[in-house]
Image (spheres, helix red, strand yellow):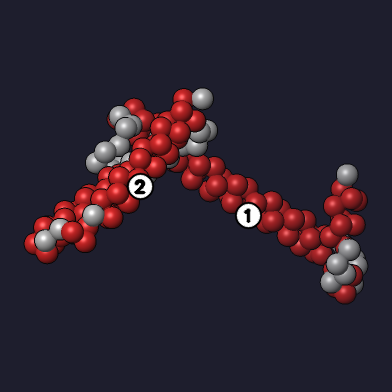
């Protein structure tokens, strides 16, 4: 509800700003040229500063069920947040490496079973080329 209230407040401020800008633009033709040039330059500076401010506030941490991780100058995370985020990332990398190693070991064991069967059995080598033979060997062991 607080988020909805802040959005409504921002919407009302934007509407009020648009009304004020429309009113000022109506009387723009009556002003002298040097005043209009100073107003144009001030408007460009104001728009440039607003773009910079909006890009700084775009990354919000922990809002709406989302988590943004940034280690910039204006971060809101302390040293504990950095440490815990780094540990989670490190655990993720080690988990992926462990899964890769386990898959490699599993594949090597499957190939070892086929090689063992090839070397110890009296079947012709053409039987080992059959795609269903590995399945037969796996079910035969159980």
Q: Residues under labels 2 and 1: Cα distance?
A: 63 Å
Image location of residue 130, percent across then percent down: 88, 69
Q: Quadrant of the C terminus?
A: top right
**Which residue is painted at 32% across and 43% down in the image?**
17
Q: Report the residue marked by disc 1.
A: 104
User: Residue reaching furthest front?
Assistant: 30
Q: Report the residue marked by disc 2.
A: 18
Residue closest to the eye, 64 or 22: 22
Judge whether 3 appears above or below 36 on screen: above
Residue closest to the eye, 142 or 115: 142
Image location of residue 28, percent across then percent down: 22, 57
Asked if the residue at tag 1 contacts the one at tag 2, i.e. Cβ–Cβ closer than 8 Å, the answer is: no
- For marks 2 and 1, the one nearer the N-term is 2
Q: Check disc 2 and report its element: helix, strand or loop.
A: helix
**Which residue is painted at 30% across and 30% down in the image?**
79
Q: Residues within 10 Å of mark 2 (few under 14, many from 20)?
A: few
- Mark closer to the observer (2, 1): 2
Image location of residue 52, percent across then percent down: 26, 49
Image location of residue 73, percent across then percent down: 24, 41
User: Residue reaching furthest bottom?
Assistant: 126
Judge whether 1 appears above or below 141 on screen: above
In the shown orientation, is residue 7 left or right of residue 13? right
Residue 134 in sight: yes
In the shown orientation, is residue 38 left or right of residue 97? left
Residue closest to the eye, 80 or 77: 77
**Which residue is painted at 41% across and 32% down in the image?**
9
Which disc number belongs to residue 33?
none
**Which residue is painted at 50% across and 37% down in the image?**
66
Give the quadrant of residue 78: top left
Give the quadrant of residue 89: top left
Residue closest to the eye, 7 or 134: 7
Residue 55 in sight: no
């Amino acid at each position: 509800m607080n988020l909805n209230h802040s959005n409504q407040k921002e919407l009302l401020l934007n509407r009020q700003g648009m009304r004020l800008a429309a009113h000022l633009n109506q009387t723009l033709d009556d002003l002298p040229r040097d005043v209009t040039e100073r107003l144009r330059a001030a408007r460009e500076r104001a728009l440039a500063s607003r773009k910079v401010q909006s890009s700084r506030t775009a990354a919000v941490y922990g809002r709406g069920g989302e988590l943004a991780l940034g280690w910039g100058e204006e971060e809101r995370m302390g040293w504990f947040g950095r440490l815990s985020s780094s540990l989670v990332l490190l655990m993720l990398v080690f988990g992926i490496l462990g899964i890769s190693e386990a898959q490699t070991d599993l594949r090597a064991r499957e190939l070892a079973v086929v090689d063992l069967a090839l070397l110890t059995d009296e079947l012709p080598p053409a039987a080992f080329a059959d795609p269903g033979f590995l399945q037969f060997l796996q079910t035969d062991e159980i």
